[in-house]
Image (spheres, coloured by chain):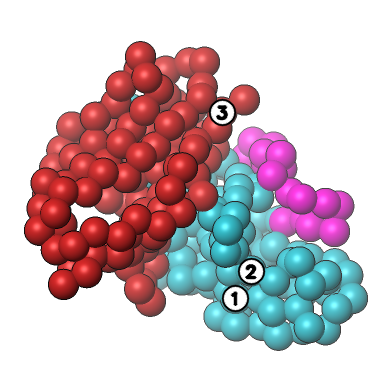
Chain colours: A red, B cyan
Amino acid sequence: AQRVTQPEKLLSVFKGAPVELKCNYSYSGSPELFWYVQYSRQRLQLLLRHISRESIKGFTADLNKGETSFHLKKPFAQEEDSAMYYCALSKGSQGNLIFGKGTKLSVKP
Amino acid sequence: GAGVSQSPSNKVTEKGKDVELRCDPISGHTALYWYRQSLGQGLEFLIYFQGNSAPDKSGLPSDRFSAERTGGSVSTLTIQRTQQEDSAVYLCASRGRAILPGANVLTFGAGSRLTVL
């Protein structure tokens, strides 16, 4: 069965510090992985997807099939990065999207 | 509409009552998802509709939960005989036709917050 694990419920860092939000998955096929973000009082929205190899708002994430991980990283955290972050896995371009339990990132001034 | 609309935005009900939550997806979107968001549980998948295919109901927590999607557009999530543990934010999301890898990107509604007293 497909599963997404985000081991940290809360991650607190100071502004300017590096941040890494962990995501591990279990899936026997070729997964498609995503990071979604929910800022305070806003809707859940896509942050980035592994297929695009993009950097959004300074965040990057690399799919490591050997470690079955898709950790989200940013070298210098900003206060506006404070939000709830969800890692998600999809079986192919269609079908169900399974989310992890989320990590709340708090960036202190 | 421009986005995914959900109603009501807030619903307070008494234990044992039935509730209906509505979702209007983006026009033309073929896929529609329901999730439940609660503290400590993150986003729990409930049900997924894709075009005319049979829905994936594997996430529904009990037979008190059901959902319909009429005419391939509006969806209604029904919870019968509500319990206090049903209190959560119910999120709806839709997606257009996804063919290419990485295209399974969802647009979420603002959610319906359900409180069962």
Q: Is residue B27 visible?
A: no
Could you tell me if residue B25 is visible in this image? yes
Label drawn at residue A67: none
| Residues shaded magenta | B52-67
The reply to whether the magenta stretch includes residue A89 is no
Residue at the spot of label 1: B113
Q: Amino acid at mark 2?
A: Ala
Dominant SS of magenta comes to loop
Numbered label attached to residue A2: 3
Q: Position of residue B37 (x, y in %)?
A: 57, 61
Which quarter of the figure has residue A11?
A: bottom left
Residue at screen point 57% across, 64% down: B39
In the image, residue B11 lies at what x, y percent?
A: 66, 82
Magenta stretch encompasses residue B63: yes
Residue at x-position 52% and y-position 70%: B111
Chain letter of disc 3?
A: A
